């Protein structure tokens, strides 16, 4: 009872702060934003809580700097921005992995896979953290870092929500197996591990292949390796490439994507958003840019539409690399990382 009272008091003071703030700017709204945010989730209790899991990790790919992505996103003010949307925000520093450089120094390839033990250890730790937040009814927002982290985040989500579906927004399918990978970069492989595809390696035995092919959908693909295309076909995995975005428009594509994985809009959704899904003119500072990508609005629309379902239970924003391109590009990419997260957590245009 005391707890409820406190929560209520907090909500009321929040409401007061928000409406006062809006009044001061002459932007009075009939329904304060926090109430819209608080009202909608089908899976999270009120007050809605988000835990930011900063993952300064780059071992799933070769370009240094992507480990600084989460640091920049936090410094750009993301926690505060989410608070202003009415979320209770938990962030107690970036995830501390045990010495990554030492680990990588003594981590020779397994077959083609680079830094295999380090990536595995990091992702296993991330799975535990994400799983714990999910279990406690908190939405984990993982900031990468490279997309190998997705095998940790999705594993964590599926532990708490076994019937969750995954919307993977990316220029790439990240579904190479031990057999098909050309680069050996594990950020091109997390989906294969989650589905249990390819031959098994002992170091990854902790991953339960908990994701079903029919619970996965892609949006934004345009750079898919031949081996990956074969896997998508063989397993009948639904994918909306940029061709479909051009043909149907993003509104229809998101609707079709959700109709496939979540027809009644009653299943939890994990959104894993690789910023390289966006066109390089929109998000230039990323390690594997591919031209012909999503526009600024298309990217944000995906996030907004998923928020509107009330089904979002976990979110990843990955592959922001502040060491690439000039200062203005870095600023632009970091700002977009933040605004995508806000859109997925309830920011509206009106
Ligand atoms: N998360 C990413 N940016 N992945 C890029 C993967 C590129 C390529 N398909 C590979 O396997 O190496
Ligand atoms: Mn990716
Ligand atoms: Mn990608």
Image: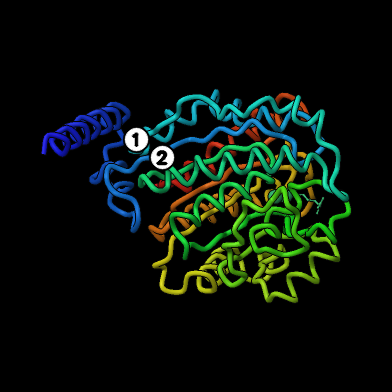
282 or 1, which lies in front? Answer: 1
Q: Is residue 180 left or right of residue 128?
A: right
Q: Position of residue 136 (x, y in %)?
A: 36, 44
- From this viewpoint, is residue 9 visible? yes
> Mark 2 and 1 residues: CB-CB less than 8 Å, in contact?
yes
Disc 1 target residue: 88
Q: Position of residue 249 (x, y in %)?
A: 61, 66
Secondary structure beneath dot 1 equals strand
Q: Is residue 296 left or right of residue 314?
A: right
Residue in the image at 86% along x and 65% along y: 226
Above or below, 270 against 229 in this view is above
Q: Find the residue positioned furthest to the left.
A: 1
Disc 2 target residue: 50
- Label 1 packing within 10 angstroms: few (<14), some (14-19), many (20+): some
Residue in the image at 81% along x and 35% along y: 107
Residue in the image at 76% along x and 26% along y: 326
Q: Find the residue positioned furthest to the front.
A: 202
Q: Is residue 136 left or right of residue 292?
A: left
Above or below, 186 against 256 in this view is above
292 or 142, which lies in front? Answer: 142
Secondary structure beneath dot 2 equals strand
Q: Position of residue 235 (x, y in %)?
A: 70, 74
Residue in the image at 84% along x and 47% along y: 110
Q: Position of residue 295 (x, y in %)?
A: 65, 51
- Label 2 packing within 10 angstroms: few (<14), some (14-19), many (20+): many
186 or 35, which lies in front? Answer: 186
């Amino acid at each position: 009872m005391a707890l409820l009272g406190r929560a209520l008091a907090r909500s009321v003071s929040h409401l007061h702060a928000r409406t006062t703030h809006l009044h001061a700017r002459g932007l009075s709204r009939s329904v304060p934003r926090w109430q819209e945010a608080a009202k909608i989730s089908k899976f999270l209790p009120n007050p809605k809580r988000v835990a930011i899991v900063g993952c300064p990790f780059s071992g799933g790919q070769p370009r240094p700097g992507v480990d600084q992505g989460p640091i920049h996103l936090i410094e750009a003010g993301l926690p505060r921005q989410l608070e202003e949307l009415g979320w209770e925000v938990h962030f107690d520093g970036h995830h501390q992995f045990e010495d990554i450089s030492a680990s990588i120094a003594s981590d020779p390839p397994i077959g083609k896979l680079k830094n295999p033990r380090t990536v595995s250890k990091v992702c296993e730790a991330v799975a535990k953290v994400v799983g714990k937040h999910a279990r406690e009814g908190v939405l984990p927002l993982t900031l990468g870092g490279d997309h190998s982290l997705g095998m940790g985040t999705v594993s964590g989500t599926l532990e708490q929500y076994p019937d969750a579906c995954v919307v993977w927004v990316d220029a790439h399918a990240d579904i190479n197996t031990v057999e098909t990978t050309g680069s050996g970069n594990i950020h091109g492989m997390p989906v294969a591990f989650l589905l249990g595809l390819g031959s098994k390696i002992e170091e990854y035995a902790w991953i339960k292949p908990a994701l079903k092919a029919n619970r996965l959908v892609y949006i934004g693909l345009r750079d898919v390796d031949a081996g990956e295309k074969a896997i998508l076909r063989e397993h009948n995995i639904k994918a909306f490439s940029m061709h479909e975005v051009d043909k149907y428009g993003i509104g229809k594509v998101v609707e079709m994507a959700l109709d496939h994985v979540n027809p009644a809009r009653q299943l939890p959704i994990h959104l894993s958003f690789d910023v390289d899904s966006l066109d390089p003119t929109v998000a230039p500072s990323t390690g594997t840019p591919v031209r012909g990508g999503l526009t600024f609005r298309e990217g944000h629309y995906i996030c907004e539409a998923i928020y509107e379902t009330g089904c979002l239970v976990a979110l990843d924003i990955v592959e922001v690399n502040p060491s690439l391109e000039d200062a203005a590009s870095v600023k632009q990419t970091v700002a977009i990382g933040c605004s995508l997260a806000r859109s997925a957590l309830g920011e509206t245009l009106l």
